[in-house]
Image (tube, grey):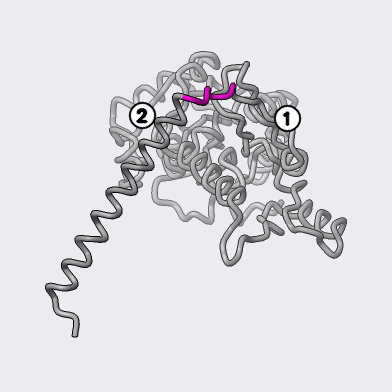
Amino acid sequence: MVTEVDIRKMVEEIIRDMGRDAAEADEEKARMDKSDPQPAPVVPEKSADSDRTGAQPIDPSEGGEECLPDLAEVNLREQCLVPHPFNREALLSMKQSTPARVGVWRAGPRYKTETLLRFRADHAAAQDAVFNDVPEEFLTKNNLEVVQTECVDKDQFITRPDLGRQFSEESKAEIKRIVGAAAPRVLVYVSDGLSSTAVAANSMDALKTIAQGLERQSITLPKPFFVRFGRVPAMDVVSEVTGAEVVCVLIGERPGLVTAESMSAYITYKGTVGMPEARRTVVSNIHSGGTPAVEAGAYIADIIRMMLEKKVSGIDLKL
């Protein structure tokens, strides 16, 4: 019968043997390093994998440290990871009809490494869209004065949605100063919402198209401004402060794994604080892969024209 003392001796002997083996391996490696010079690193040529995925390896001569493809450049709708599909054309046709991750294949019961890395990259882009601020360069370039809600920082904006709907008296006075003393017929402003990336990518193109469309109706927009840490209902405060008939806010949507650049336009006729959400009209999914910003701007201008004619918004406005 094996006693506890015997087991302890066996374990100690195994540990000593492992230590001797590791020491001998280190000595052998040191001798090999001295005798054999290290070969120069070889830049791999474009592989079949890069052709299949559409991503190109980084050239070390251009500042890259490793020859890794940029997975974010891969168009998932054109990528086929299923080996030897029964009907490749049908699979690719189905992928063209949806942004969903169809036909990503697997490694055993798990995702393939490439699929998992792209998933994590898209998730990181979504997080950046929420937690990053709209760049100051963007605000300066487009001459957008900044008005802040009651939120003091991004963390409070995320955890206290109620404060993102409210303005201090000083901020209300600032809005009034920017817009002017006279109540405008239509007011359009920009807010970060839950995607600073969406605002930077789409808001100015949409705003310019809206302004052009309303000019044809002899409507001139007052100077736009930017609301930092703003939620959608903040537009009701803007409506009451300025007395505008129609208020439209271009605001970043909550990002997902398909895109982090999706923007929405919320529009109300004579909005008031605490009004039902059913009184809002929304145009969503404004981004390069959905409704392009210029096209959305023309549509929004037409909706605003209808609101002024019918004097209603939301579900009461029949589009």
Residue at 50% from the left image edge and 27% from the top image edge: 183
Q: Quadrant of residue 288?
A: top right
Position in image of residue 220 (x %, y %): 63, 22
SS for dot 1: loop
Q: Residue at x 40, y 38 (%)?
A: 237
C-alpha separation, residue under disc 2 versus residue under disc 1: 52 Å
- Residue for badge 2: 148
Q: Is residue 155 visible?
A: yes
Residue 12, picture quadrant: bottom left
Residue at the extreme bottom of the image, as rendered: 1
Closest to the observer, 2 or 183: 2
**Magenta-highlighted residues:** 35-40
Label 1: how many Cα within 10 Å (few below 14, some 14–19, many 20+): few
Mark closer to the chain start, 2 or 1: 1
Q: Which mark is residue 45?
A: 1
Q: Secondary structure at mark 2?
A: strand
